[in-house]
Image (cartoon, rainbow, N blue to C red):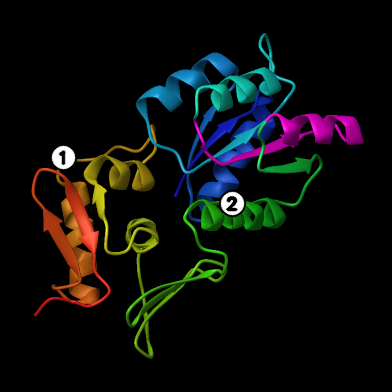
Amino acid sequence: MRILIVEDDPLLGSGLKTGLGQDGYVADWVRSAEPAEHALRIEHFDVMVLDLGLPGRDGLSLLRDLRRRGIDLPVLILTARDAIADKVAGLDAGADDYLVKPFDLDELSARIRALTRRGGGHAAPLLQAGELALDTSRRAVTLGDQPLSLSPKEYALLETLITCADRVVPRARLQAATYGWQDGTESNALEVHIHNLRGKLGKGRILTVRGVGYQLVAEPLP
């Protein structure tokens, strides 16, 4: 899962990037509205964490513009503005959630998980595809009754694939869900992780759609 953090405070922005990264997310951080817009034009993100008090153009203006353009990316406002009028303005501008600073990182992470579940059409934390189950609240994966041990990259890939179970996920989206801007990646890194996942899930469960991407199927092919 890939998160865009838009926060001008260097200490908080760096802390969010590190903390969410340790929680298993791929997090990229920008400090103002302009680089955020550029990032959203060229990259895929699952959630944006948005501060309102940005230098130059504020976060509310950015959010309103994104919604006017039909961009339905889940947005969580993270701000020191705690007045009811500010919360109402943020939600009416198109925010999906509103969290006031100071905050607890565990609560922020839980709210992000809830946003991505709803965005993917899932209300519960348990994602399933046949006998395969992924619990986003515990970051636990089981196949049948057997728990599976996955690396952080394998988990990120599987979470994206199972959210879109039985649909083809473009290679670029899987790449975005697994690697941020600062990650050094080799050209075949995604294929290596897919290969390792197949070894743990069974070869018939993740299909290759040449020239497009990969598809996780609920019932593995023989």
Image position, residue 176 (x, y; %): 34, 41
What's the residue at 34%, 88% (across, down)?
144
Magenta-drawn stretch contains 173:
no
What's the residue at 36%, 25% (across, down)?
42
In the figure, is residue 206 to the left or right of 177? left
Amino acid at dot 2: Leu
Q: Are marks 2 and 1 in contact (CB under 8 Å)?
A: no
Magenta-drawn stretch contains 87:
yes
Query: How many angstroms separate mark 2 from mark 1 (CA)?
Result: 31 Å
In the figure, is residue 100 to the left or right of 162? right
Q: SS at mark 2?
A: helix
Q: Residue furthest top?
A: 56
Image position, residue 162 (x, y; %): 35, 64
Relative to 32, residue 138 above or below: below
Q: Earlier in the sequence, mark 2 or mark 1?
A: 2
Q: Which residues are magenta?
A: 71-93
Q: What residue did someone put label 2 on?
A: 115
What's the residue at 50%, 22% (across, down)?
69
How crowded pointer 1 is (Cα within 10 Å; few <14, some 14-19, many 20+) is rated as few
Image position, residue 113 (x, y; %): 57, 56
Choose mark 2 or mark 1, whichever is in front.
2
Res. 80 visible in picture: no
What's the residue at 56%, 43% (across, down)?
18
Res. 3 visible in picture: yes
In the figure, is residue 218 to the left or right of 82? left
Q: Which mark is residue 187?
A: 1
Amino acid at dot 1: Ser
Relative to 19, residue 66 above or below: above
